[in-house]
Image: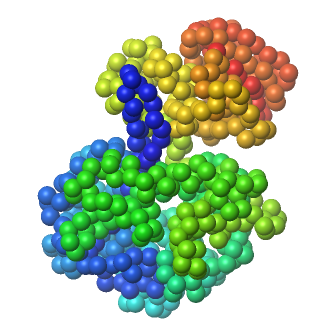
Amino acid sequence: MIYIKWYNLFEMEVFFYLIKNIGWTLGNDCPCKCKHCYSFSVRQKGKNLTKEIVDRVIEQIEKLNVETVNLGGNEPIFTNGLDVKKSMLPYILKELNKRNIKVGITTAGISLIALKNTYPECLELLNDVDISFDSPYEKEHNENRGGDVFKYAIQALEICREYNIESGIIMCAMNWNFTKDRIDELIDIAKKYDSNIRFNILKPIQLQHFKFVPTKEQVLEIYKYLFEKCDTVELSEPTLSGLTQNNKIKGCACGIYSMRINSITPDGRIPVSPCVYMHDYRIGDLLKEDIYDIINSEQFKAFKTRKENYKNIEGCKECDKAEICRGGCFAMAYTYKKCETGEKDLYARDPFCFKDMEVNKIINYKKITTCMNDQIKQIAERLRGLRDVLELTSEDIARDCDISAEEYRLAETGDYDISVSMLQKIARTYNIALDALMFGEEPKMSSYFVTRAGKGTSIERTRAYKYQSLAAGFMNRTADPFIVTVEPKGDDEPIHYNHHNGQEFNLVLEGRMLINIEGKEIILNQGDSIYFNSKLPHGMKALDGKTVRFLAVIM
């Protein structure tokens, strides 16, 4: 993730960077000639990578404390021409792993096969591999890629299965391949090799791409089909997230939560982009400039400004899905209009906006793939960023905030639940907004702040525990009101206890819950409320096997 907010800590303005994912285009040569390729028009065989160049780039990546790096774009093995033995890919894999950064590659199969044949020790360094399939039918796939490469994609899946590497089948969704019969065949391939599937709707970078772009009707039809065929469907397109009311994903992540390091140019530069598809936004030179300066550029900020001001985008002002969609995909909107009219419009409408279609009958939101909640991982990143700024150790934070050192250490990993009470202690101790830690957004209002029904900023800490803030936009609050949703657990599941300074008020809105305060068990029915000293250890659980919703005011 990238830009979060400005905070005033010790009279210093500090810019928080919480970059989660980086894509790094390594190759300076690619044997494929894919008809839909987004980089073909700007592809230049650049200079070779050296150890010194790689060290400099990785040094800049490390500054951002990223979680994952994906090596792709061109075939990543071909960093120094088509001679595999001169490749810098093995060195890059080793250096990123040394820094505990998860590394994946995107390939047509060629790079993974080359690693197995020439650098087999590197296979254990891969966290995941994405393998491109334009079609499950060999002839179609080869024709679109301009070579006999289908067999390499299959071999790559076999290698992933052999070496227990997580694999994903990636299809660029076009009008000719995004069909039910091809989806069925892809699913069969995925099942055979225990792989995942992801679809990316084609972004028309050039006029020649327009003849391949699927229609909105086609996209909706196929996603409906996917919901019927698959247990889990991951939605990466913002307009689809808005359509299904999936509030876990709000708007386009590019330039805000993810970024692209481009391949080295013929003149020896390594530019950076907010989005892999935005060729107008190749910024700076990572070999000479600091990565913080680059992502502070106006080009990067334009992505966040657009997302924050989504109501200024054509058609978004009165849309009930805009809060989630946030204007859709920046690249799709910008490049589509640029190719269509020649106009460079940052606030163009995403052509895959479904606002004017009767979509409720077409698609229903089912469930979204999560790894222990991405939102928890984002909070953990913010905690680490705050600690770095304050130049404190985890032991310092635990002591200052009266938190168990072990509990705080686990919170920073992002793999364990993080209680609101802990976040509130940290926020109050260091005089920052609770919203900044929970949601990555700083409140702006000082007179009043209205939260419409069902529209509060929310975070799902776990699948069973969700907070919806009712005052996220109000500055310097003396109380923090939330709507809390608790899903039922088994009777043998222990209650998780919290304690924090101040007082707390709970009002049950739906269901029945048991609240335990310092060993005293109290059952609250719908309409019942309780006010208590929150310094005392307290916890709650849903009763009767039903969901509980309650108003919690933390003071």
Is residue 496 in view? no
Q: How many circles with numbers are drawn on the protein? A: 0
- Residue 14 appears left or right of 493: left
Relative to the observer, which residue lies in front, 28 or 342? 342
- Residue 100 appears left or right of 435: left
> Residue at the spot x=37%, y=65% of the render?
282
> Residue at the spot x=27%, y=60% of the render?
285
Relative to the observer, which residue lies in front, 23 or 95? 23
Residue 341 found in image quarter: bottom right
Residue 396 found in image quarter: top left
> Residue at the spot x=48%, y=20% of the render?
431
Relative to the observer, which residue lies in front, 126 or 38? 38
Residue 26, image x and y in percent? 28, 67
Residue 334, image x and y in percent? 55, 68
Q: Is residue 431 above or below residue 190?
A: above
Q: Is residue 414 above or below residue 206?
A: above
- Residue 239 appears left or right of 290: right
Is residue 9 in view? yes
Residue 8, image x and y in percent? 44, 27
> Residue at the spot x=67%, y=53% of the render?
311
Q: Residue furthest right?
A: 527
Q: Residue furthest front?
A: 343
Q: Is residue 208 above or below residue 1?
A: below
Residue 380, image x and y in percent? 45, 35
**Which quadrant does the C terminus fall into?**
top right
The type of colouring in the image is rainbow
